[in-house]
């Protein structure tokens, strides 16, 4: 109701990092967005105008603030979220062209349930070019997405395990390698 009535609200919520303490913030609510069966409120903080993404299940109390003047979001909010997977929007990061390979095991899944709406499947000459550059990758298929790199994109790509390999850009590939190495180092500590 606060969104449709353009009403400023105060929210008491707890973060993912600290579920035992509440924080209060006055926001101008703009949009409800669903990702991975969880709903989020997209709003700007009254204090500094910063765009916030707040998980609804972390909000404890909503208090209307009728004395505060509501400020509409300037621009197209939905357009800003077109370049990401999920809800984590880094306004200062560019859209990256990410190329990846998917094994035969997961190829049809990725084809029928794209990771992002910009997903492209490479065939013919472009596929042959990738095959000559990555000779160790037999079978499977090559894809790309054009996205801002965020937590949800990394998590989605890594969820395929060895069935999906990020090829470019090198900086993103190295970030994935670091995350896998870090994960592996934790497993060495677990008794067999």
Image (cartoon, rainbow, N blue to C red):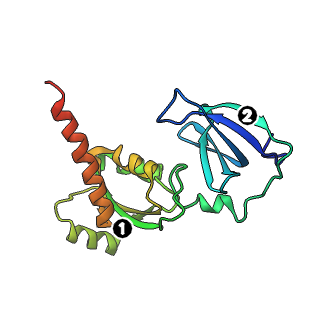
Q: Image check: 82 left or right of 182? A: right
Q: Secondary structure at mark 2?
A: strand
Q: Are marks 1 and 2 in contact (CB under 8 Å)?
A: no
Of the two numbered discs 1 and 2 in the rendering, the one whose residue sits closer to the viewer: 2
Q: Residues within 10 Å of mark 1 (few under 14, many from 20)?
A: few
Q: In the depicted view, which residue is nearer to us: 145 or 104?
A: 145
Q: CA distance from mark 1 to mark 2?
A: 51 Å
46 to the left or right of 66: left
**Where does residue 34 sit, x and y in percent of width and height?**
61, 43
Residue at left 43%, top 49%? Answer: 151
The residue labelled by disc 2 is 62
Name which residue lies at 68% across and 52% down: 47
Judge left or right: residue 8 versus residue 14.
Answer: right
The reply, left or right, for residue 15 in relation to residue 189 is right
Write the residue at 25% across / 53% down: 177
Rendered-image quadrant of the C terminus? top left
Residue drawn at x 16%, y 60% is 136
Of pointers 1 and 2, the one earlier in the residue sequence:
2
Residue sitting nearer the eye, 171 or 112: 171
Q: Which mark is drawn over residue 175?
A: none
Query: Looking at the image, which residue sits at the far left?
Result: 192
Q: Position of residue 135 (x, y in %)?
A: 17, 65
Image location (x, y in percent) of residue 171: 31, 64
Q: Secondary structure at mark 1?
A: loop
Residue 166 on image: x %, y %: 31, 58
Above or below residue 132? Residue 103 is above
Please tell me in which quadrant of the rendered image residue 39 appears.
top right
In the picture, the quarter occupied by the N terminus is top right
For residue 63, what is the image quadrant? Answer: top right
Question: Where does label 1 land, which residue?
Answer: 123
């Amino acid at each position: 109701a606060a969104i449709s009535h353009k009403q400023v609200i105060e929210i008491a919520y707890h973060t993912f990092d600290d579920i035992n303490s509440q924080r209060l913030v006055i926001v101008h609510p703009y949009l409800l967005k669903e990702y991975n069966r969880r709903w989020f409120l997209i709003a700007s903080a009254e204090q500094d105008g910063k765009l916030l993404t707040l998980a609804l299940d972390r909000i404890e109390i909503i208090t209307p603030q009728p004395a505060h003047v509501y400020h509409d979001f300037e621009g197209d909010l939905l357009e800003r979220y077109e370049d990401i997977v999920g809800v984590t929007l880094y306004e200062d990061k560019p859209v990256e062209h990410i190329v990846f390979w998917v094994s035969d095991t997961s190829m049809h899944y990725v084809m029928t349930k794209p990771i992002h709406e910009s997903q492209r499947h490479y065939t013919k000459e472009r596929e042959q070019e990738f095959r000559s550059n990555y000779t160790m990758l037999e079978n499977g298929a090559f894809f790309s997405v054009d996205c801002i790199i965020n937590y949800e994109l990394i998590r989605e790509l890594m969820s395929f395990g060895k069935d999906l390999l990020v090829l470019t850009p090198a900086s993103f590939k190295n970030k994935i390698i670091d995350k896998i190495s870090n994960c592996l180092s934790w497993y060495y500590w677990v008794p067999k």
